[in-house]
Image (spheres, coloured by chain):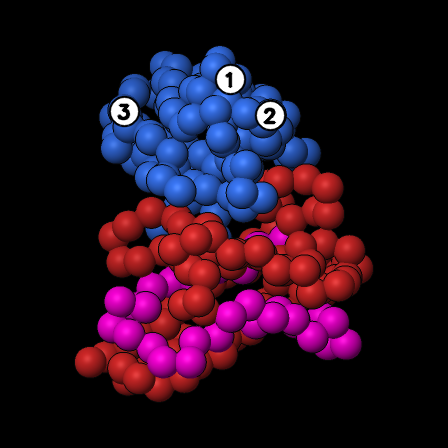
Amino acid sequence: QSALTQPASVSGSPGQSITISCTGTSSDVGGYNYVSWYQHHPGKAPKLMIYDVSNRPSGVSNRFSGSKSGNTASLTISGLQAEDEADYYCSSYTSSSTQVFGGGTKLTVL
Amino acid sequence: EVQLVQSGAEVKKSGESLKISCKGSGYSFTSYWIGWVRQMPGKGLEWMGIIYPGDSDTKYSPPFQGQVTISADKSISTAYLQWSSLKASDTAMYYCARRSFDTYYMDVWGKGTTVTVSS
């Protein structure tokens, strides 16, 4: 199974909104509403930000939102803040009963 | 507090065996899956496999099938990731993470175990 496709990097200024895409196939992203997103600051444990496409865990800012259309899921961060600078990974359940991550996107807050 | 505590950093030579651990606390260990995730230096996260300690049901991502073994000892709330013969390419950070029985997202993560393999 191949990794899901994410842009290598995105950037935005404080206060702006950015969107990170995550493209898979009908055997993963398109076939199930089980896409999750993780924020990863280097040297720390990854943190769950969105689950089941668009749900936010308790404690995650409502500036983070998720959506899906066909084989592509998206993470949108509104009102960018300096602390949002991190790597972001999408993940999906697959038809093989496993999971797969995206290649990761480095978010830079200018 | 729910937490996963991983074993310490390891430095090994090619060909050696290794078993790293992930101990769960603060929740019912047998009611959640424990997954393992690799991050090679400068690279992204890779989903390796997962085990359900309640019945030891285990699933591996195809690239890792046959390369590693995932196991668990529910009597001590600990999951393991092991190699029988390490390669230099196994050098990476390894994270364990918890996944609820009927969900497909990892909600609690360990801090990671660094494995360095020299040739």
* Disc with the residue nearer the chain's start (2 vs 3): 3
> Could you tell me the amino acid type at mark 2?
Asn
Q: Quadrant of the C terminus of chain A?
A: top left
The residue indicated by pointer 1 is A68
Rendered image: mark on residue A33: 2
Q: Main secondary structure of the magenta part?
A: strand
Q: Give the spatial CA distance, label 1 vs label 3.
A: 21 Å
Q: Please tell me which residue lies in front, A29 or A18.
A: A29
| Chain represented in red | B
Q: How far apart in space, not on screen, are marks 2 and 3 (Cα)?
A: 27 Å
**Quick check: can you spot residue A31?**
yes
Q: Are marks 2 and 1 in contact (CB under 8 Å)?
A: yes
- Choose between A12 and A52: the one closer to the eye: A52
Q: Which residue is mark 3?
A: A11
Q: Amino acid at mark 3?
A: Ser
Secondary-structure class at tag 1? strand
